[in-house]
Amino acid sequence: MKMKFGAIIASRRRELGLNQVELASRLTARGLSVSNQAVSKWENGLTLPNAKQFLILCQTLEIDDIRGVFTGGGEGLLRGLDKDGRRKALDYIQLLRDSGRYALRPREEEPARLRSLPLYSLAVSAGTGQFLDGEDYEMVEVGAEVPEGANFGVRVAGDSMEPQYHDGQTIWVRQQRSLMTGDIGIFLYDGSAYLKQLVARESSMALHSLNPKYEDIIISPELPLRVLGKVMH
């Protein structure tokens, strides 16, 4: 790094027709107390200037594109050209910009990846309960608006899960056989399908409605409860 830096400084100094003493004098005139010995150490990779010295050094050597020069890009491509050559190169670059033919184009967004999921036409009950099972569904294409983990969709019927889920709303579900207490999912119980929240009561589990006007459905140990999946938020 030091040798690369020193070589760039020495090359630019020579391009401006300066010796080390003259460069040190110009730096001193800009408020730095720098000797020609210090310049020699920079160019030979023995030391590096501090931040203030570096910035004033770049100004003195007329290095505008600091990043480009010291990383090999940008104005570093102009090294080796005299002032007239640099001016002509920059003028040509400006002509290219003004023409508009070579302007960067806005990056086109990649089209959203679509996938097909089954959407059940039989509404899942958010009220009295309707049966959801079998093959009565249609395949629909969905994009990023549907959670990645969803496996199928159903339409809500009723208002027992208001205000979070509304009558006629399509919800997307990740198929799984068990849920944690507090999860909202799709359940089959006593021959009907429900959109409910699984909650624990004193002596049993229950299917809970978010709408307070509906009572919980207490799960009887004598009737099987089947979990179809978890609603994806």
Image: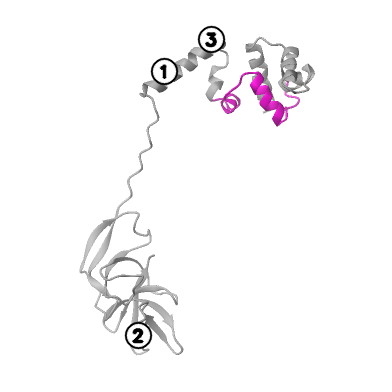
| Spatial CA span between label 1 and label 2 | 76 Å
Is residue 67 covered in magenta?
yes
For disc 2, the neighbor class at 10 Å (few under 14, some 14 to 19, many from 20) is few
- Give coordinates of residue 226: x percent, y percent: 34, 78
Quadrant in which the C terminus appears: bottom left
Residues drawn in magenta: 44-73
Mark 2: amino acid? Glu
Mark 3: amino acid? Asp
Q: What element carries label 1?
A: helix
In percent of the image, x 36 and y 68: which residue is there? 231
Q: Are marks 1 and 2 in contact (CB under 8 Å)?
A: no
Q: Please give left or right for residue 34 compared with residue 197 in the image.
A: right
Q: State whether residue 152 is above or below residue 219.
A: above
For disc 1, the neighbor class at 10 Å (few under 14, some 14 to 19, many from 20) is few
Mark 1: amino acid? Leu
In the rendered image, which residue does mark 3 sit on? 84
Residue 132 occupies quadrant: bottom left
Of mark 1 and mark 2, the one earlier in the sequence is 1
Q: Please give left or right for residue 154 compared with residue 74 in the image.
A: left
> Is residue 133 visible in this depiction of the protein?
no
In the rendered image, which residue does mark 2 sit on? 215
- Give coordinates of residue 65: x percent, y percent: 57, 25
